[in-house]
């Protein structure tokens, strides 16, 4: 059946690849991978993997074994790591999969060893206090006997210039040669921008692949990938003094033309854009509160725009974050299933 969704997510494959190539160049001698968790940050994990693999990326990261299954058969030569490790219920799949678990806890290490081991990755906590083994566990020999491809850690504040970055880097560097791991990996998108001391053997960008600006060093180099588009349901004229939307948060100070779009916060165009967002390259400001399924924009600047026409929402991540107060990660991953995703 042909989809006739009134929502499109226009996805720029060339921009995605260009972003990865810039990040790979910044990674220097380190290999550059790609985080494709959360369905490729909402864009579609499989098409992202295919485009980046064709460009030369070989290392990919997801969170769960459900995400592994959703990817389907992996292209030859592709490495896939499952960041949340392996539960009891995952063991049968993990033992036969081409993907590797990233072991995060003492219990996961014991579980993997008892099952006969096999190639794995390991996460070490160096100060984020989220997932990962303690460095002491590593130094005390917990990982002895494991076949480890990559030893990983994760930077907590790489988007800021804070002493924590160097503390984490130094703590991770101190583990070099203390395990059987053939590679070490610390840097995310922002960590890549911190420079070669943070790159180790493998970098694993996420946000910047999809158009997010992780630090100032990336400004002018990272391109927007996702462009939400919605159809006009109705064009209407309101008079000075008329209000728009729930709770009348906008009142017209003059007569104006509105277009009502088939998009709302159920699609990931969130309420933070109410009276702040825009479309059409800034030509059409959002007026009133964003509804679950509907959005009003002022279209005085386009007299010919009408029912059935398509409008592109302004969604460059840095600017959209400034408009809405919503983090770029949330802006991407919130984009909903009602969009027809179209790669160009």
Image (spheres, rainbow, N blue to C red):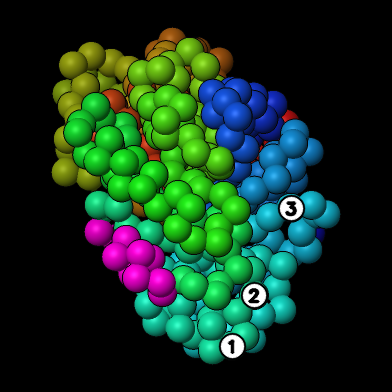
**Cβ–Cβ below 8 Å for labels 3 and 2?**
no
Q: How many marks?
A: 3
- Numbered mark located on residue 241 in the image: none
Q: Which residue is mark 3?
A: 78
Q: Position of residue 47 (x, y in %)?
A: 70, 47
Quarter of the figure with the N terminus = bottom right
Q: Nearer the viewer, mark 3 or mark 2?
A: 2
Q: Residues within 10 Å of mark 3 (few under 14, many from 20)?
A: some
Q: Secondary structure at mark 1?
A: loop
Q: Secondary structure at mark 2?
A: loop
Question: Relative to 249, is 179 above or below?
Answer: below
Q: Residues within 10 Å of mark 1 (few under 14, many from 20)?
A: few
Question: Relative to 112, is 260 above or below?
Answer: above
The Cα–Cα distance between marks 3 and 2, rounded to whole angstroms, is: 17 Å
Residue 12 forms part of the magenta stretch = no
**Cβ–Cβ below 8 Å for labels 2 and 1?**
yes
Mark 3 or 1 closer to N-term?
Answer: 3
In front of the other: 309 or 342: 342
Q: Position of residue 205 (x, y in %)?
A: 51, 39
Q: Residues within 10 Å of mark 2 (few under 14, many from 20)?
A: some
Q: Residue at x 25, y 41 (%)?
A: 167
The quarter holding residue 8 reads top right
Q: Residue at x 25, y 30 (%)?
A: 160
Mark 3 or 2 closer to N-term?
Answer: 3
Q: Position of residue 229 (x, y in %)?
A: 55, 34
Q: What segment carries the magenta color?
A: 129-142
Q: Residue at x 46, y 27 (%)?
A: 196
Q: Which residue is mark 1?
A: 115
- Numbered mark located on residue 118 in the image: 2
In front of the other: 57 or 44: 57
The Cα–Cα distance between marks 3 and 1, rounded to whole angstroms, is: 24 Å
Q: Secondary structure at mark 3?
A: loop
């Amino acid at each position: 059946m042909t989809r006739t969704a009134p929502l499109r997510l226009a996805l720029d494959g060339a921009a995605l690849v260009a972003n990865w190539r810039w990040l790979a160049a910044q990674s220097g001698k380190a290999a550059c991978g790609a985080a494709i968790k959360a369905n490729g940050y909402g864009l579609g994990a499989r098409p992202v993997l295919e485009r980046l693999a064709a460009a030369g990326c070989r290392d990919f990261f997801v969170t769960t074994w459900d995400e592994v299954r959703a990817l389907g058969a992996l292209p030859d030569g592709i490495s896939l790591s499952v960041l949340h490790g392996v539960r009891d219920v995952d063991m049968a799949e993990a033992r036969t999969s081409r993907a590797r678990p990233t072991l995060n806890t003492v219990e996961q290490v014991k579980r993997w060893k008892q099952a006969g081991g096999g190639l794995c990755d390991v996460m070490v906590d160096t100060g984020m206090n989220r997932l990962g083994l303690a460095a002491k566990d590593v130094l005390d020999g917990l990982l002895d006997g494991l076949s480890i491809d990559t030893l990983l850690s994760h930077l907590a504040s790489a988007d800021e210039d804070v002493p924590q970055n160097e503390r984490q880097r130094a703590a991770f560097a101190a583990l070099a040669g203390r395990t059987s791991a053939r590679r070490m990996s610390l840097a995310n998108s922002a960590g890549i921008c911190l420079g070669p001391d943070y790159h180790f053997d493998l970098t694993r960008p996420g946000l910047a692949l999809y158009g997010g600006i992780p630090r100032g060093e990336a400004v002018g180099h990272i391109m927007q990938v996702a462009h939400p588009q919605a159809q006009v349901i109705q064009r209407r004229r309101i008079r000075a003094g008329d209000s728009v939307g729930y709770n009348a948060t906008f009142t017209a100070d003059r007569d104006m033309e509105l277009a009502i779009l088939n998009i709302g916060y159920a699609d990931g165009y969130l309420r933070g854009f109410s009276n702040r967002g825009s479309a059409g390259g800034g030509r059409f400001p959002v007026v009133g509160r964003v509804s679950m399924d509907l959005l009003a924009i002022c279209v005085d600047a386009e007299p010919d725009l009408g029912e059935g026409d398509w409008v592109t929402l302004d969604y460059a991540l840095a600017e959209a974050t400034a408009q809405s107060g919503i983090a770029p990660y949330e802006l991407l991953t919130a984009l909903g299933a009602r969009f027809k995703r179209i790669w160009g």
